[in-house]
Image (spheres, rainbow, N blue to C red):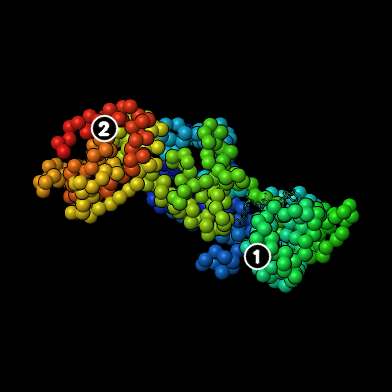
């Protein structure tokens, strides 16, 4: 058993970026991936849309990312994670081999897998004319005859992208009706170079060394379509949410984990980044951006967790984790007014770093330092601010809105009593 600040699940571009940032921030961390480092991008031949690398291969880019993270102290193990569950203010990470680890925060960067057609030739010609990513590989097929397989938004939207390069594009779908949005269908199917092949199923993909044809079955007969590339979009299976069996992690209909703009999921301390996250685009660039945000926020969350624990030692771990996730860091320069006497009371503040002074009718009444808090009287009574609070030094405060404050009091009777007794001692 080991304890970490953060555990990262998945060793693709998102996971490697998260590990790089965690290592550089000196956070104790561990990245787990049972398949090896690199993720799905290892299966992409050429990559020409990652800034700074005009032309590289997916494997080369992934290896460079791993080397980079290792140079700065990334720790990783090629092991599978079986289950993640909240245990107080920590996450319990149960491994496939039965060992258990704990972390204050977890970043899910487990990616996902394109659904395979499962026909002869698909595996054999992968990277030699079979692709699951038009944006990655489309440009290598300028002036070629291509096919997309599938009838959803991905097939039609990626098909639209491929029309920039294709001389002819066959859209092979097992039904005559397409489930893709009408507007996307209108755009694609009004193009002369696009031909619908429906209802039809792909029976085999073949050629010599590279893809040269597909056999499709239509109306009971098999016909061969000569072409240079097949792009398959019959669904994508995101991974990660299945690790949460004891609590619900919010996800969309497709199983993608829902986050806010800071990559936070609905579970305090759990973040999602990259292809397993609900978002419009699934690119290496978006994955590394997600992971950067996730780790930087996780670092802040852990700091807030430690402050909340110190300030409310009587609250349970779950309450502390939820309290920390509801806090926002705000900073003030010396002399700045933080709250003004007479203003409506809308936030509760905890002093994380530096000193503040409480001023009433022009007189400094007292100083508050790290670990002390203010703003609770107005929130408890509904009254306006009864004093002005100014930054005495440079200060860092953790602020909580009224809804989160009320939730914290509701969840922890001990915290409510402690805050009420501090409020009773206030002069103003
Ligand atoms: P999808 O909507 O699940 O569509 C998959 C397509 O593949 C369906 O047309 C399905 O046929 C077909 N299919 C599935 N298994 C097949 C098989 N074994 N053989 C042949 N065909 C098969 O997947 P998606 O297009 O990747 O989209 C996933 C989600 O992302 C959707 O919610 C979609 O709206 C969203 N998305 C949105 C956008 C956007 O621009 N807003 C872009 C991309 C994706 P049937 O129709 O017969 O079931």
Secondary structure under badge 2? helix
Residue at (16% x, 38% y) in the render: 428
x then y, percent, for residue 277: 54, 49
Rendered location of residue 281, percent (x, y): 57, 57
Residue shown at the point (33%, 40%) measured from the top left? 402
Q: CA distance from mark 2 to mark 1?
A: 58 Å
Number of the label disc, if any, that sits on residue 346: none
Does mark 1 have its CB less than 8 Å from ligand 1? no
User: What residue is shown with label 2?
Assistant: 419
Q: Is mark 2 within 8 Å of ligand 1?
A: no
- In percent of width and height, residue 48 lies at 59, 66
* Element under disc 1: helix
Disc 1 designates what residue?
161
Graded by Cα atoms within 10 Å as few (under 14), some (14 to 19) or many (20 or more), the crowding at tag 2 reads: some
Image vertical order of residue 179 relative to residue 94, above or below: below
Residue 351 shown left or right of residue 295 in the figure = left
Q: Position of residue 184 (x, y in %)?
A: 66, 61
């Amino acid at each position: 058993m080991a304890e970490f600040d953060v555990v990262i699940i998945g060793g693709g571009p998102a996971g490697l970026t998260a590990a790089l940032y965690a290592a550089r921030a000196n956070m104790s961390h561990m990245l787990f991936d049972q398949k090896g480092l690199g993720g799905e991008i290892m299966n992409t031949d050429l990559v020409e849309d990652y800034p700074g690398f005009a032309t590289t291969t997916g494997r080369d880019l992934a290896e460079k990312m791993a080397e980079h993270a290792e140079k700065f102290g990334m720790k990783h193990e090629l092991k599978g994670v079986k289950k993640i569950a909240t245990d107080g203010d920590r996450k319990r990470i149960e491994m496939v081999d039965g060992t258990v680890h704990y972390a204050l925060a977890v970043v899910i960067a487990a990616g996902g897998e394109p659904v395979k057609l499962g026909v002869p030739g698909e595996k054999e010609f992968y990277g030699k004319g079979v692709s699951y990513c038009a944006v990655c590989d489309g440009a290598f097929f300028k002036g070629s005859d291509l096919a997309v397989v599938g009838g959803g938004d991905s097939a039609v939207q990626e098909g639209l992208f491929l029309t920039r390069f294709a001389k002819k594009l066959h859209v092979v779908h097992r039904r005559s009706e397409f489930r893709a949005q009408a507007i996307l269908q209108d755009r694609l199917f009004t193009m002369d170079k696009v031909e619908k092949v429906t209802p039809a199923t792909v029976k085999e993909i073949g050629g010599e060394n590279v893809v040269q044809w597909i056999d499709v079955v239509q109306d009971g007969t098999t016909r061969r379509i000569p072409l240079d590339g097949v792009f398959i979009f019959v669904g994508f299976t995101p991974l990660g949410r299945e690790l949460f069996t004891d609590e619900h992690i919010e996800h969309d209909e497709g199983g993608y984990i829902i986050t806010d703009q800071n990559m936070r999921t609905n579970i305090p301390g759990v973040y999602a980044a990259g292809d397993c996250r609900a978002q419009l685009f699934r690119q290496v660039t978006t994955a590394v951006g997600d992971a950067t945000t996730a780790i930087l926020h996780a670092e802040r969350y852990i700091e807030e967790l430690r402050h909340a624990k110190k300030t409310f030692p009587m609250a349970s771990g779950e309450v502390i984790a939820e309290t920390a996730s509801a806090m926002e860091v705000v900073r003030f320069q010396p002399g700045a007014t933080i709250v003004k006497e007479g203003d409506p009371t809308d936030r509760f503040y905890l002093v994380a770093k530096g000193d503040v002074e409480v001023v009433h009718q022009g007189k400094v009444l007292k100083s508050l330092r790290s670990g002390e808090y203010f703003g609770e009287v107005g929130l408890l009574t509904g009254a306006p601010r009864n004093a002005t609070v100014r930054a005495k030094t440079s200060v860092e405060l953790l602020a909580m809105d009224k809804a989160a404050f009320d939730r914290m009091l509701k969840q922890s009777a001990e915290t409510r009593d402690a805050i009420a007794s501090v409020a009773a001692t206030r002069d103003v």
